[in-house]
Image: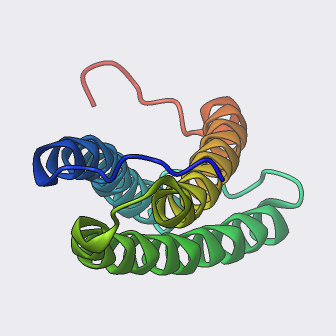
């Protein structure tokens, strides 16, 4: 049998700290997304669009609905990050690689969810900005 040498508390603390840094970065990214969602929501609900734009109402409703879904998903992912962060303390109980792998696997699954969410939101944001930029009312100079 190939037995592994148990981990020390210092080694585990270092590993946990690394994972916590990742989660803090994810939370920071999602806080920025929260601000962007607020801005986009205000933009979509403003009266800054030309009223004679074809299919304006339908497009705006679609974007508003998709933004609402993005906001809901952000809340879910944020909650999952907080849960994961709270559970990382249990990693101190790990004394071998098998136990550690469970935490790393969960961490990597969550990382993939965060990346997928942020990329999807960035695509939606780009789509909305491209559409909005083409139809915003043109302001008269000095008006």
Percent position of residue 131, x then y: 72, 39
How many tags in the picture?
0
Q: Residue at x 67, y 38 (%)?
A: 135
59 vs 26, nearest the viewer: 26
Percent position of residue 16, x then y: 25, 52
Q: Residue at x 68, y 58 (%)?
A: 51
Q: How is the image coloured?
A: rainbow
126 vs 10, nearest the viewer: 10
Q: Is residue 100 visible?
A: yes
Quadrant where the C terminus sits is: top left
- Choose top left, top right, bottom left or bottom right for residue 134: top right
Percent position of residue 10, x then y: 11, 45
For this orientation, the residue located farthest to the left is 10
Percent position of residue 112, x then y: 64, 51
Q: Is residue 99 left or right of residue 15?
A: right
Residue 119 vertical placement versus 95 (above, below): above
Residue 119 vertical placement versus 107 (above, below): above
Q: Residue at x 43, y 58 (%)?
A: 96
33 vs 9, nearest the viewer: 9
- Choose top left, top right, bottom left or bottom right for residue 67: bottom right
Q: Is residue 47 visible?
A: no
Q: Residue at x 63, y 59 (%)?
A: 109
For this orientation, the residue located farthest to the right is 54
């Amino acid at each position: 049998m190939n037995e592994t040498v148990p981990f020390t508390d210092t080694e585990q603390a270092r590993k946990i700290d690394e994972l916590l840094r990742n989660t803090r970065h994810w939370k920071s990214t999602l806080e920025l997304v929260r601000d962007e969602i607020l801005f986009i929501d205000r933009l979509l609900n403003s009266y800054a669009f030309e009223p004679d734009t074809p299919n304006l109402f339908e497009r705006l409703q679609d974007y508003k609905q998709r933004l609402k879904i993005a906001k809901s998903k952000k809340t879910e992912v944020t909650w999952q990050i907080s849960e994961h962060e709270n559970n990382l303390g249990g990693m101190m109980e790990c004394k071998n690689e098998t136990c550690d792998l469970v935490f790393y696997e969960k961490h990597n699954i969550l990382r993939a969810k965060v990346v997928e969410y942020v990329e999807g939101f960035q695509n939606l944001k780009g789509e909305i900005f491209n559409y909005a930029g083409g139809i915003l009312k043109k302001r008269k100079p000095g008006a």
